[in-house]
Amino acid sequence: MKTEQLVRTFVEYFEERGHQRIVGSTLLPPPGDSVLFTTSGMHPLTPYLEGRPHPLGRRLVNVQRCLRTTDLDEIGDATHLTVFEMLGTWSLGDYEGPRSLDWGYGLLTEGLGIDRRLLHATVYAGDGRSERDTASLQLWQDRGVPVELTVDDNWWSNGPVGPCGPDSEIFLWNGDGPPRSTPTQDDRWVEVWNHVMMRHRRLGDGSLVPLPQRNVDTGLGLERLASLLQGKSSVFEGDLFEPWRRLVPPLWRLEESSRRLVCDHLRSAVVVLGDGVRPAHTGRGYVLRRLVRRVLTVLWREDPSYGLDDLPDELIRHTLDHFRQDMPPAGVRRLLLDEERRFRLLMERGRQVLARPRFRGRLTEEDFRYLHDTHGLPRDLITSLSQG
Ligand code: SER
């Protein structure tokens, strides 16, 4: 099943069950939001989870693009992407968790044809914060799906304060042979869908208070499920990355995890540019800058003659088309190349400055400050130059 078809099947399934589709899905959070990028499907819905009536009603479905910098160190493995899409559903004070899980189970098994013996669930075991989620446990037992009880892995929050609650996660077996063990013991169980019983709010002092309504918030990582349905064990093997798999290896000789990182970060940079962000030394623009610089660092480590000039237009266009962004590919290319030029100059300057006797040996905090304030050299760049 192609990714586009998976999206259609998901959205229609929930539309048939009374959900309205939210349209528009930029990476930029609404004005006044303190985070730099949308990090999950529920994020733009925070005010509605907290009780404000949503103009589209109490049952919603959405495809939301997200960017997570918290997972940057994981990029290169089989399941993480910096920019990814999340399929999401919400009950804003309408139906409760067991119904959500039951629909989720129905969609995975009947709608998408997944063998139910390949599923495993986890459920919140209960602790001082909240009691055991017996309703979810019961639902899974009734459906014959094995359940593991955990505490911290089954509590979801978007940050230290705000809406949060116990969750029930659905895992799909991705190993050879019959399923074994449990999700916390064996990482061949891949998490595909999280259903959060979003009914608490954590306050600044750490205490929990009930939200004005009992919500359910679910999120399913699109690329991850699509690649599993396509019989692939890595998101980079799925249909969305087909042009990257075809065009990048002949261009740049890289080992597997570096190639994944380069593809992930370049694709993410294109999407971020497509949503209107420009490289800068702070905020969103700095995240973008770091993505591009990390790509260049990896490429130059392999071969200093590698560069973004070689990046095929097809990859830029494919990404912009998939995310329905209307920026011209030539504009994206120009910005990437500007950024590369700037970084090359900075690297040269950095090398010259760091060659001075004063900077031999271990650098002090004062050195870092001086190098930053006087020469514009960020700490991560100094560190990589001193190591390289
Ligand atoms: N908030 C949950 C998540 O991001 C479900 O949407 O996983």
Image (tube, grey):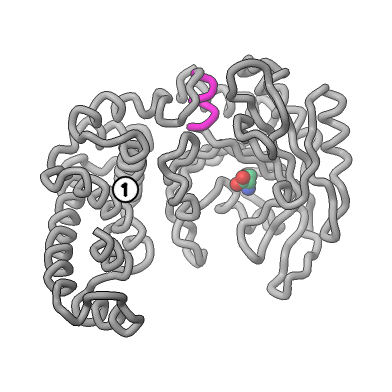
Q: Give above or below for 68 relative to 350.
A: above
Q: Nearer the viewer, residue 9 or 58?
A: 9
Q: Nearer the viewer, residue 187 or 211?
A: 187
On whether ligand 1 comes within 8 Å of the CB at mark 1, the answer is: no
Q: Give above or below for 377 relative to 105.
A: below
Callout 1: SS: helix
Q: Give, as a single range, the part of the protein colored magenta.
A: 223-230
Q: Nearer the viewer, residue 138 or 122?
A: 122
Q: Which residue occupies 82% across, 59% down?
A: 129
Q: Is residue 224 magenta?
A: yes
Q: Disc 1 residue type?
A: Ala
Asked where in the image residue 387 lies, by quadrant, the reply is bottom left
Q: Is residue 69 visible?
A: yes
Q: Position of residue 228 (x, y in %)?
A: 53, 24
Q: Which residue occupies 23% across, 63% down?
A: 385
Q: Is residue 290 magenta?
A: no
Q: Which residue occupies 24% across, 78% down?
A: 371
Locate the C terminus by quadrant.
Answer: bottom left
Prevalent SS, magenta region = helix
Q: Is residue 95 visible?
A: no
**Residue 314 relative to residue 120: left or right:** left
| Residue denoted by label 1 | 269
Q: Which residue occupies 26% across, 83% down?
A: 370
Q: Position of residue 165 (x, y in %)?
A: 74, 53
**Residue 134 relative to residue 225: left or right:** right
